[in-house]
């Protein structure tokens, strides 16, 4: 029977099918971090269970870590306590731990691929919804809750019903100034935040085939924002070239054997999907969000839609605009910006810093803007220095911070104050996501850079 | 983590007719610093429920003494966003045993089932009927019958059935969780793992 890429990977990981229930689903790689794992370890202890395959779990500290002075003890006692718990639990159960200050430390969805832990055809979970990032490699990757973290630790399996399948095709060429982030925000704006709930998405078409791994990761990362469990892209030469020689990638014969198998991970020509959507690359312009969910996005040159023109409840929509301090019909261009955040597992990779630098080069940071530039990992940080990007951004008046999730969820001190506007390259513009009362405009690194040098929402195409 | 068995629940309900209620609203990230599962109910809907100075916001539904009960009735796409199970813990710890919505986000629904909160998905029309019934009379009771898989508005008699897979249903009825099941099939899992390439 013909199968989709998703079927091939899913079916090869089912240990048992339960009649009228979920599949018992085997997990190849499990990432843990300090926030969603402590209670899972407590659960293990209270049941007297051990970790079945510690070598399949990888710990990194990222959600709750400071992005300056990482060499000093963490000041907030609660955060310090969580970091200590991760370290102690990892040591106790023999799990590799890349804690704060470790050379390989960084955001879980950045360091996983960077080190070759992620691979095509793998099943990958983590107690973080943006685990979907790893789907860029042709893996089935999705976020889980803490109870499931406990299941994976103790049995390397979770219980999951198989999701429905959706394919999203984007064909043609992207215009100048349009990045993978814009492609994703565009798709979400078309589908709404719940449009893909219950589905696992495969992205196909020229646009994704021509994308770098960094770009594919940005797109797959945002799958969850349209409700999908995850998204994936068939592995190809770009994927193999990225993974080859990474610290934990296979070597020699084992690598060749694996590549031969990975090449079979494609959707068969006559395989079918429960739903299929197709978009044109040429319809996509640089995007920006104006509301309090990632589906409330539009082309940067457009005006905020009327409540009647959008799907869903008028009351919810108006409450959202009120929170943002915006009105129907407002243009976004020229709106004031107080903060700019470049970073997160969505846009904290080297390519994102290159894009940011391409606009700020030879310009100056606007005085009214506070900018947080946070690399996704120490490796990204090293590349920023090596490629001369640090020079460019320093000359333009920016500072580089240390790796971590930072203002993506504002668990550490990087919080946007109430009422202030932040153009953010992260993934969620929910009320208070970047600090109580904060107002978030999601956008690409180019749009973030344009805002950072002009102090207002600006079309990056005018500065390229 | 063990939770109370669920069978038939008859209770008044709290209406929250907003759409896209995300888990950052249910429990903001700054309350995720605990290393134990305790006290999350106090911070359920923290920023909608309290002012910055910690005083309750009068216009938020949980602060309105007229509405109470073990059932939370939410708007469409309830629980979207972050996978934090803390959101489901907060709902449970606050005292809700059931969340009703015309549409749930996937991970939240899963998390609820894992911690003993029953997610009941109803049609958009039925969801309207529930809201109206509660607004007409905040003492309206709703009956959730898990064995029969039905939800009934007792004041009007309106009734609808809901879906749950038989495995999860058994778990809820018996207060079991997935770990109990997975533990029982460990040798199968080990032989499966032995056959893997990577
Ligand atoms: S950067 Fe944001 S979305 Fe990504 S792992 Fe960290 S908190 Fe989650």
Image: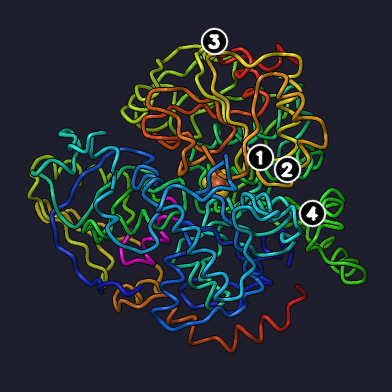
Badge 3 element: loop
Residue furthest toward the front? A72
User: Which segment did they paint magenta?
Assistant: B105-119
- Chain to which the residue tagged by mark 2 belongs: A
Q: Residue at x 14, y 62 (%)?
A: B10
As drawn, A350 above or below A15:
above
Nearest to the eye among marks 1 and 3: give it: 1
Query: Quick one: label 4, few (<14), some, or many (20+) residues within 10 Å?
Result: many
Residue furthest toward the bottom? B187
Q: Do the residues labelled 2 and 1 touch (CB within 8 Å)?
A: yes
Q: If you read the primary sequence from the N terminus, does the residue marked by circle 3 or circle 2 appear first?
A: 3
Label 2 lies in ligand 1 vicinity (Cβ under 8 Å): no
* Quarter of the figure that contains the N terminus of chain A: bottom right
- Chain to which the residue tagged by mark 3 belongs: A
Q: Residue at x 17, y 51 (%)?
A: B13
Query: How far is disc 1 from disc 4 in space, using C-alphas?
Result: 26 Å
User: Mainly helix, strand or loop, the magenta region?
Assistant: helix
As drawn, A454 above or below B147:
above
Q: Name the residue under label 2.
A: A380
Q: Quadrant of residue B142?
A: bottom left
Can you tell which mark lies on residue A334? 3
Q: If you read the primary sequence from the N terminus, does the residue marked by circle 1 or circle 4 appear first?
A: 4
- Chain to which the residue tagged by mark 4 belongs: A
Q: Mark 4 points at which residue?
A: A235
Query: How far is disc 4 from disc 3 in space, using C-alphas?
Result: 41 Å
Query: Quick one: label 3, few (<14), some, or many (20+) residues within 10 Å?
Result: few
Q: Which residue is drawn at 50% across and 73% down?
A: A151
Badge 4 element: loop
Nearest to the eye among marks 4 and 3: give it: 3
Nearest to the eye among marks 2 and 4: give it: 2
Q: Within the magenta stretch, is there residue B54?
A: no
Query: How far is disc 2 from disc 4 in space, using C-alphas?
Result: 23 Å
């Amino acid at each position: 029977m013909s199968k989709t890429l998703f079927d091939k990977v899913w079916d090869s990981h089912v240990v048992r099918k339960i009649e009228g229930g979920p599949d018992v689903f085997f997990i190849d790689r499990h990432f843990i971090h300090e926030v969603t794992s402590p209670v899972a370890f407590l659960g293990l202890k209270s049941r007297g269970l051990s970790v079945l395959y510690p070598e399949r779990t990888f710990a990194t500290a990222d959600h709750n870590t400071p992005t300056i002075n990482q060499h000093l003890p963490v000041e907030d006692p609660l955060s310090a306590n969580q970091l200590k718990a991760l370290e102690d639990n990892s040591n106790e159960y023999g799990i590799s731990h890349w804690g704060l200050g470790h050379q390989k430390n960084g955001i879980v969805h950045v360091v996983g691929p960077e080190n070759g832990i992620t691979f095509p055809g793998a099943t990958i979970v983590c107690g973080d919804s943006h685990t979907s990032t790893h789907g860029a490699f042709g893996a089935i990757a999705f976020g889980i809750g803490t109870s499931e973290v406990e299941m994976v630790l103790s049995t390397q399996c979770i219980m999951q019903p198989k999701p429905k399948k959706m394919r999203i095709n984007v064909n043609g060429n992207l215009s100048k100034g349009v990045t993978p982030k814009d492609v994703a925000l565009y798709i979400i704006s078309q589908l709404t935040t719940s449009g893909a709930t219950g589905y696992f998405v495969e992205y196909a078409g020229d646009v994704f085939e021509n994308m770098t791994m960094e770009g594919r990761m940005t797109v797959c990362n945002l799958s969850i924002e349209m409700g999908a469990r995850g998204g994936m892209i068939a592995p190809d030469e770009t994927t193999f070239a990225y993974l080859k020689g990474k610290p934990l990638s296979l070597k020699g014969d084992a690598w060749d054997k694996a590549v031969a198998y990975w090449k079979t991970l494609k959707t068969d020509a006559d395989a079918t999907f429960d739903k299929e959507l197709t978009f044109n690359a040429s319809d996509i312009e640089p995007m920006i969000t104006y509301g309090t969910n990632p589906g409330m996005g539009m082309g940067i040159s457009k005006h905020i839609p009327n409540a009647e023109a959008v799907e869903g409840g008028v009351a919810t929509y108006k409450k959202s605009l009120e929170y943002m301090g915006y009105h129907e019909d407002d243009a976004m261009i020229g709106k004031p910006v107080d903060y700019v955040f470049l970073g997160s597992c969505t846009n904290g990779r080297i390519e994102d810093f290159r894009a940011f630098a391409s606009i700020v080069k030879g310009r100056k940071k606007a005085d009214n803007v506070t900018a947080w530039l946070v690399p996704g990992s120490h490796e990204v940080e090293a590349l920023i220095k090596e490629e001369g990007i640090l020079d460019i951004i320093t000359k333009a008046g920016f500072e580089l911070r240390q790796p971590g999730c930072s203002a993506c969820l504002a668990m550490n001190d990087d919080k946007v104050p109430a009422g202030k506007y932040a153009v953010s390259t992260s993934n969620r513009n929910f009320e208070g996501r970047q600090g109580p009362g904060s107002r978030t405009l999601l956008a690409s690194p180019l749009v973030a850079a344009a805002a950072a040098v002009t102090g207002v929402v600006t079309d990056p195409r005018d500065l390229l | 983590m063990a939770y109370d068995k669920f069978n038939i629940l008859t209770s008044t309900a709290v209406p929250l007719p907003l759409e896209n209620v995300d888990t950052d609203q249910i429990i903001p990230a700054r309350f995720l610093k605990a290393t134990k599962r305790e006290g999350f109910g106090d911070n359920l809907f923290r920023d909608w429920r309290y002012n910055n100075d910690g005083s309750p916001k009068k216009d938020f539904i949980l602060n309105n003494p007229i509405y109470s009960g073990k059932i939370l009735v939410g708007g469409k796409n309830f629980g979207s966003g972050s996978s934090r199970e803390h959101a489901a813990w907060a709902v449970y710890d606050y005292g809700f045993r059931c969340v009703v919505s015309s549409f749930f986000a996937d991970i939240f629904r899963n998390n609820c089932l894992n911690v003993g909160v029953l997610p009941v998905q109803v049609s958009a029309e039925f969801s309207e009927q529930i809201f109206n019934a509660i607004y007409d009379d905040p003492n309206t009771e709703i009956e959730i019958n898990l064995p029969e898989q039905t939800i009934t508005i007792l004041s009007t008699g309106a009734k609808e059935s809901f879906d749950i897979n038989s495995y999860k249903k058994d778990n809820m009825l018996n207060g079991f969780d997935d770990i109990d099941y997975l533990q029982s099939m460990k040798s199968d899992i080990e032989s499966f793992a032995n056959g893997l390439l990577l």
